[in-house]
């Protein structure tokens, strides 16, 4: 709970409700991430600023969003949200519900590739990749 210490009142309850009310696609992706990428530590519905990230890796500063049809109508809001998260140093990767449900393995593979790219970039910034 220490990560919620500086959050406004009600954040913990809201996060719990969002986890309880997960979409089918979120449930499928959560199970797949835990099975196929167990070494990666993701949190579900974790608060980041005024938003809740569907799946968040603090270690990689990486967010996965699973979007339903309503997001097709809120592109400006999603763009502003993504921009804010990126300013905070997060990489945001978005998938549609139907992509997760119809091609779960492909989605997990894309997440894995993005995590490896992010890890490689972090090592290069620290000079660990130099010979």
Image: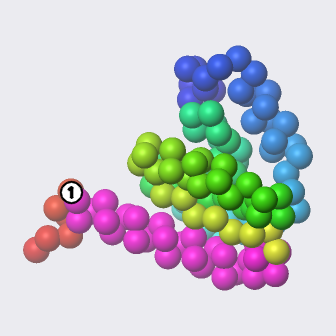
Task: Give the colour scheme of this rendering.
Answer: rainbow
x 14%, y 70%: residue: 130
In the drawing, does residue 65 fall left or right of residue 13? left
Segment colored magenta: 99-125
Circle 1 — which element? Answer: helix
x and y, in percent, of residue 99 in the image: 76, 77
Q: Badge 1 is on which residue? A: 126
x and y, in percent, of residue 43 in the image: 64, 47
In the drawing, does residue 82 fall left or right of residue 124? right
Looking at the rendering, in which quadrant would you find the N terminus? top right
x 57%, y 25%: residue: 2
x 58%, y 64%: residue: 93
x 70%, y 80%: residue: 105
Residue 129 within the segment the image draws in magenta: no
Q: Residue furthest top?
A: 9
Crowding at label 1, few (<14), some or many (≥20) Cα neighbours within 10 Å?
A: few
Q: Is residue 13 above or below residue 57?
A: above
Main secondary structure of the magenta stretch: helix
Residue 114 within the segment the image draws in magenta: yes
Looking at the rendering, in which quadrant would you find the C terminus? bottom left
């Amino acid at each position: 709970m220490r990560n919620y210490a500086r959050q406004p009142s009600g954040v913990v309850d809201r996060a719990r409700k969002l986890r309880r009310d997960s979409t089918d696609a979120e449930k499928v992706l959560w199970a797949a991430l835990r099975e196929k990428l167990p070494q990666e530590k993701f949190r579900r519905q974790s608060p980041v600023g005024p938003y809740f990230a569907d799946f968040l890796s603090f270690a990689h500063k990486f967010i996965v969003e699973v979007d339903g049809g309503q997001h097709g109508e809120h592109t400006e809001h999603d763009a502003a949200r993504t921009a804010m998260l990126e300013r905070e140093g997060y990489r945001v990767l978005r998938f549609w519900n139907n992509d997760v449900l119809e091609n779960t393995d492909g989605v997990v593979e894309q997440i894995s590739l993005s995590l490896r790219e992010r890890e490689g970039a972090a090592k290069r910034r620290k000079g660990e990749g130099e010979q």
